[in-house]
Amino acid sequence: MKLTVRIWRQAGPDAEGELVTYAVDDLSPDMSMLEMLDVLNERLVEGGEDPVAFDHDCREGICGTCGVVINGRAHGPEKTTACQLHLRSFDDGDVIDVEPWRASAFPVVKDLVVDRSAFDRIIGAGGYVSVPTGSAPEAHATPVAKDDAELAFDNAACIGCGACVAACPNGSAMLFTAAKVAHLNVLPQGDPERDERVLNMVETMDDEGFGGCTNVGECTVSCPKGIPLDSIASLNREFFRASWRRSR
């Protein structure tokens, strides 16, 4: 299998970038997109060239590190992470464009690597619960309704990859923030910080320069973990509730 890959190359945050074309052959359809980049980098290093910088870690669709835009779509044509996207999703001889996330809150560090620490700061603003020290409590000490548990698990599946931001025409982080708020706010363990959590996380999200949500829906379409659009509606309800309670 042979592919022509046009990859965004940018030496640093302040440098100008451009798409550079590479021909990569002897590929297997069972290779992942990242394995194809590994093959390309081996050849670049052997030829004395600078390898393509890209983020990766688990390569199992769990960590959310490997986000790139492939042919104009976050993570590519399949609803999965880039590390789980296999070359069989393309045809022999295809031309593939690979670019970094495009959002003002995710500045490019080098090539396909972007700085997503804005997500960390949103989490730091309220993505936690207060727990007493000591041994772990009994599993049934705090009952959780089945519907609430399922909703919490659905939102906790978010891996923070940033595909929602990259896919959104406004560069909004509402789906990410909504998932992180929802999976804690529906549980009794998260109730003590419920109001402060949503207010602080939304404020931090705005301060980081993410765009506003206009309910386009591209975020949930591109989300590899299927975080539902309803989570944004839930975030809005939580935010208005907390704002009203604070103003009383």
Image (cartoon, rainbow, N blue to C red):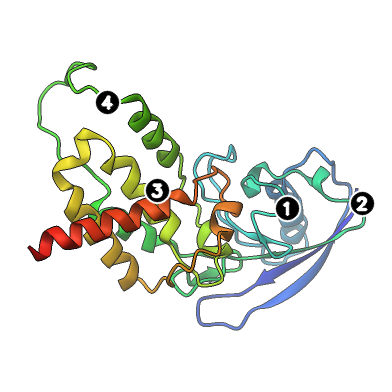
Which of pointers 1 and 4 lies earlier in the amino acid sequence?
1
- Which residue in the protein does label 4 denote? 144
Residue 14, position as x, y percentages in the image: 51, 82
Residue at position x 68%, y 70% in the image: 8
Q: Amino acid at mark 1?
A: Pro
Which of pointers 3 and 4 lies earlier in the amino acid sequence?
4
Q: Give the mark toward the camera: 1 or 4.
A: 4
- Which residue in the protein does label 1 denote? 77
Contact, mark 1 vs mark 2 (Cβ under 8 Å): no
Q: Amino acid at mark 4?
A: Val
Residue at position x 64%, y 54% in the image: 75
- Which residue in the protein does label 3 denote? 179
- Which residue in the protein does label 2 denote? 92
Pick whichever, 84 or 24, lies toward us: 84
Secondary structure beneath dot 3 equals helix
Contact, mark 3 vs mark 1 (Cβ under 8 Å): no
Residue 126, position as x, y percentages in the image: 24, 52
Q: Is residue 245 above or below residue 80?
A: below
Quadrant of the image for the C terminus?
bottom left
Q: Give the mark toward the camera: 3 or 1.
A: 3
Which of pointers 3 and 2 lies earlier in the amino acid sequence?
2
Secondary structure beneath dot 2 equals loop
Contact, mark 3 vs mark 4 (Cβ under 8 Å): no
Residue 52, position as x, y percentages in the image: 66, 62
Secondary structure beneath dot 4 equals loop
Q: Is residue 72 above or below residue 142?
A: below
